[in-house]
Image (spheres, grey):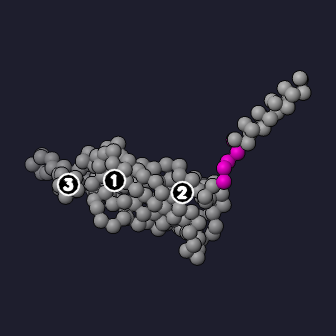
Amino acid sequence: MRVQAIVLVATIAGLALAGCQRQAEDGPTELSGRLFIFNYRVATASYMITLKKIAPIPEGTTAVAEFENPAGGDPLVVRQKIFTFWDKITLESPDLRCVRKDRPYSVSIRLVDASDKTIQTIKTEVKSDLDQTVLPTKPLVVGPVYTENPDVFKADGSVGYGHDSACPA
């Protein structure tokens, strides 16, 4: 009876440890973060995606990210060289317009080797918890010392933040 109990406990422990092992992955990275960045001071919004390296990345690898364009039209494409010693990869889109709250936007990332062969493909969606209407249409500051933008802060003391009416509904 005692031997059976020991065997049973050992079997359960072995199964528990086997469950903790990392499963085989589809590539050398995994998605670790995705969000929209709103910079109120300079009136910009962008996607930011982070990947965590979980296996070696071949020399000469490039990330090709396609971000859905919230303003409509073709996706925004970013190509970024990946260095083998990076543990974290950050991909950021160009500046965006028309980001809407709670709407899912698609992002597709391909890691390609030096011969342009796809190593890994990651597809995800990003939702914002803010609408881009929280941003002014023009930067609040200009220049390296954050001088007030005269197009926003008028000489007569009035303020014109603007409104982007060209965004799709």
SS state under label 1:
strand
Spot the residue most to the left.
156
In this rendering, position of residue 102 left or right of residue 133 = right
Across and down, in percent, residue 158 comes to 12, 46
**Could you say which quadrant of the image residue 114 lies in?**
bottom right
> Mark 2 Cα within 10 Å, few/some/many (few <14, many 20+)?
some
Spot the residue most to the bottom.
115
In this rendering, position of residue 37 left or right of residue 135 = right
SS state under label 3:
loop
* Pointer 2 or 3: first along the chain: 2
- Marking on residue 89: 2
> Mark 1 Cα within 10 Å, few/some/many (few <14, many 20+)?
many
Q: Amino acid at mark 1?
A: Ala
Q: Label 2 vs label 3: CA separation?
A: 32 Å
In this rendering, position of residue 83 left or right of residue 105 = right
**Could you say which quadrant of the image residue 7 lies in?**
top right
Q: Is residue 148 visible?
A: no
Q: Amino acid at mark 3?
A: Asp
Residue at image point 41% right, 50% down:
126
SS state under label 2:
strand
**Could you say which quadrant of the image residue 21 lies in?**
top right
Across and down, in percent, residue 155 comes to 12, 51
What is the magenta segment's predominant secondary structure? loop
* Pointer 1 or 3: first along the chain: 1
Q: Label 1 vs label 2: CA separation?
A: 20 Å
Residue at image point 22% right, 56% down:
167
Across and down, in percent, residue 132 comes to 28, 49
- Marking on residue 164: 3
The residue segment tinted magenta is 20-24
- Marking on residue 45: 1
